[in-house]
Image (cartoon, rainbow, N blue to C red):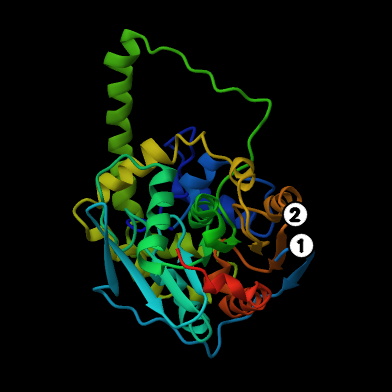
Amino acid sequence: MFSYSAVSPSLRSESFSSTSTRFIASTRQTQYRSRCVMNRRGFAVRGIVASGVSVMGSSFAAEPVQGLDKLPFKPEGYNYWTWQGHKIHYVVQGEGLPIVLIHGFGASAFHWRYNIPELAKKYKVYALDLLGFGWSDKAIIDYDATVWRDQVVDFMKEIVKEPAVIVGNSLGGFTALMSAAALHERAAGVVLLNSAGQFGNANSETKKTEESILQKSVLKPLKEIFQRIVLGFLFWQSKQPARVESVLKSVYINTSNVDDYLVESITRPATDPNAGEVYYRLMSRFMLNQSTYTLDSVLSTLRCPLLLLWGDLDPWVGPAKANRIKEFYPRTTLVNLQAGHCPHDEVPELVNGALMEWLSTLTPEVSLQKL
């Protein structure tokens, strides 16, 4: 999902010319086949909207949501915090050990609609909109993975003010990992739901060559003009409610939760005057040019328990990635879910139950520390 447009899954990092029809047809054909790994570039452009010891993975089947409280949709949002001169939207409910929820690419705090009220019955739950997404400011900056990491770290220090469990889906998963690695002991645990990010390739080398005069003066400007035209069209096309609904249904195995509430939470931010420019910067300068941060490099510095709640039927990020993360990082618990890319919204009752069971295993003293 993409907050201004439900990022067009038809885009591929190698070309902007693939059509959305072709992609959706391809996605439906492969919907029930788990893919091994999706590289960071492919994930970003297709993205819609990213215990002390290991234990044997569990598996749960999907059923329709019944009897769960839902976060009320407020067009004006909930709470706001000023960070580096930018307005950041967040939701907070409950009391107890803090849990910080981070949405995926293109979503917002409202994507945790079925999780916040239930978790808040036992914990203090925060859900924030990353800069450039949802109800947070659409800042005209050069986006980098460290921007969101720094935002979450400062949110922890200034708003949460005590160790917390950081939970993230999709792009928010990789942000949660980076934030927890930077926070060290102030991160009580990390939970990933079909996280973005990829493992590094030890055999690959980054080659940098000097740009020629022709590249700098002619080819590069032409490439930018072309990208602006194509991405401008895709931004307009894919922010239409019908398009958003179509993309959502391509990654939700159980599509019953793809409703007006969810669609509006994605399309409304598209009305911001800066939304188009932020979309362009995210797609052309950030999402298509990530090469610095890898899962193994971040996991190598992680120091807290890790829980994976993985939708095994995700057509983009299959269970092989979850298995590899568990192999790489021993302090991992893996729970497999019969769901797609956004299990927290597709099978929230299963996610809430598995998350609360895992939270009960964390040592109680973490909530007594202060930042």
Residue visible at 46% across and 78% down in the picture? 124
Would residue 2 be seen by someone viewing this image from the given angle? no
State the residue in front, 182 or 38: 182
Amino acid marked by disc 1: Val
Q: Quadrant of residue 287?
A: top left
Viewer-nearest residue: 144 or 94 = 94
The percent position of residue 175, horizontal first and vertical second, equals 49, 53
Is residue 83 something one can see in this rendering?
Answer: yes
Residue at 76% x, 62% y: name it.
53
Q: Which residue is mark 1?
A: 53
Dot 1 or dot 2, earlier in sequence? 1
Q: Secondary structure at mark 1?
A: loop
Number of the label disc, if any, that sits on residue 330? 2
- Report if the CB atoms under discs 1 and 2 are less than 8 Å apart: yes
Q: Quadrant of the C terminus?
A: bottom left
| Dot 2: element | loop
Residue 347 to residue 36: above or below: below
Residue 21: x percent and y percent? 47, 50
Give the amino acid type for the residue marked by disc 2 in the picture.
Pro
Q: How many marks?
A: 2
Q: Nearer the viewer, residue 346 or 211?
A: 211
Residue 147, image x and y in percent?
38, 46
